[in-house]
């Protein structure tokens, strides 16, 4: 337990989790940090240090420099594929076996699913899904012309990562389901996000406005701290297993 993680806040948070009938969880890159996945803003280490991720994660960047952006996504896929879920992911999967949990993530790494979480709402898509940019409707990855990026053999459209870029609308169903969960939960657990990217970062405020308690888990201050009833200042992999660990006495 980190020095800043005081026992009183932890006990209060455990009580909220134990009493909750419906929990909405919103995760960001910090929940995967202990797996070794760089958070979104510090993903730009080494080769990529001279680029701004928000610059690369945009459609016009892709149209301007498809090979560079495609290589960036392949690099991130390789990084993520070599990692494993950490105790934070596993604790969230275990919570869903005991409580009604709607897991909403901003992450594109698929680690919640690999930890055993089901029906994960991926607001920003998935790094391992591909789709087409301006495709003809009959584009087929099986017959794509290999390249950086691959292209459709019929219409020459570029394959693109199945993520949501800045300036793109979120997937409608995912967004609707996340907003419904925020409106109907009685506890919103916010884990590992700087709370800077919208509309995802607005969800804890929606939950609060509908009467839910909000708990933030983050070793650093975040833009969502002021929305929280309780801020647990520690790493998710340490904090989450203490919020509902099986061994501990009921709160
Ligand atoms: C939209 C997929 C409607 C891609 C991502 C101008 C033009 C267009 C739009 C906008 C604009 N101005 C503002 C907007 C809206 C924009 C936005 O919010 N911009 C921000 C930068 C201001 N949003 C959008 O564009 C969204 N679409 O609004 O459509 C529209 C359309 C047109 C015009 C207007 C509106 C789409 C947003 C989705 C972007 N795609 N990802 C890819 O990955 O390549 S976002 C990407 O960044 C991530 O998915 C993630 O969501 C976000 C990063 O946030 P975090 O997850 O919080 O990560 P971060 O690194 O910031 O923080 C990590 C945290 O973890 C830190 O707090 C750290 O302390 C903590 N931590 C570290 N270690 C641990 C830990 N916590 C716990 N435990 C630890 N061990």
Image (tube, rainbow, N blue to C red):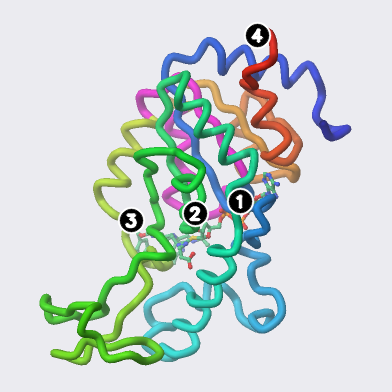
Identify the residue at image location x=67%, y=39%. Answer: 236
Residue 13 as seen in the image, left or right of residue 183:
right
Q: Position of residue 240 (x, y in %)?
A: 65, 31
- Please tell me which of labels 1 and 3 falls first in the chain: 1
Would you name the residue on which mark 4 appears?
251
Query: Going from the N terminus, do you reach mark 3 or mark 2 first?
Result: 2
Is the residue indicated by label 1 positioned so its CB lies within 8 Å of ligand 1? no
Indicate which label's residue lies in the foreground, 1 or 3: 1
Q: Secondary structure at mark 4?
A: loop
Number of labels in the image equals 4
Q: Give the CA distance from mark 1 to mark 3.
A: 21 Å
Mark positioned earlier in the residue sequence (4 or 2): 2
What residue is pinned by disc 1? 32
Disc 1 and disc 2 in contact, CB within 8 angstroms? yes
Residue matched to label 3: 170
Q: Secondary structure at mark 1?
A: helix
- Mark 4: give few (<14), some (14-19) or many (20+) Cα within 10 Å: some
- Foreground residue among 209 and 185: 185
Cα distance between the residues tagged 3 and 2: 13 Å
Q: Quadrant of the N terminus?
A: top right
Q: Residue at x 56, y 27 (%)?
A: 214
**Which range is magenta?**
183-207
- The residue that mark 2 highlights is 107
Mark 4 vs 3, N-terminal side = 3
Quadrant of the image containing the C terminus: top right
């Amino acid at each position: 337990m980190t020095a800043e993680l005081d026992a009183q806040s932890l006990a209060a948070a455990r009580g909220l989790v134990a009493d909750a009938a419906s929990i909405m969880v919103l995760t960001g890159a910090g929940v995967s940090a202990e797996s070794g996945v760089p958070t979104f803003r510090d993903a730009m280490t080494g080769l990529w240090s001279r680029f701004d991720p928000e610059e690369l994660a945009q459609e016009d960047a892709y149209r301007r420099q498809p090979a560079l952006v495609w290589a960036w996504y392949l690099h991130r896929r390789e990084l993520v594929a070599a990692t494993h879920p950490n105790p934070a992911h596993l604790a969230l999967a275990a919570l869903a076996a005991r409580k009604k949990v709607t897991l909403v993530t901003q992450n594109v790494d698929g680690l919640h699913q690999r930890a055993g979480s089901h029906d994960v709402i991926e607001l920003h898509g998935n790094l391992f899904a591909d789709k087409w940019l301006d495709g003809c409707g009959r584009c087929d990855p099986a017959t794509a012309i290999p390249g950086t990026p691959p292209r459709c053999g019929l219409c020459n459209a570029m394959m693109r990562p199945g993520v949501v870029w800045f300036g793109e609308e979120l997937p409608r169903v995912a967004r609707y389901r996340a907003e419904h969960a925020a409106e109907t939960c009685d506890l919103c657990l916010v884990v590992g996000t700087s709370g800077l990217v919208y509309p995802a970062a607005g969800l804890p405020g929606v939950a609060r406005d509908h009467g839910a308690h909000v708990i933030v888990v983050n070793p650093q201050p975040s833009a969502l701290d002021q929305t929280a009833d309780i801020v647990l200042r520690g790493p998710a992999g340490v904090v989450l297993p203490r919020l509902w660990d099986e061994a501990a006495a009921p709160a």
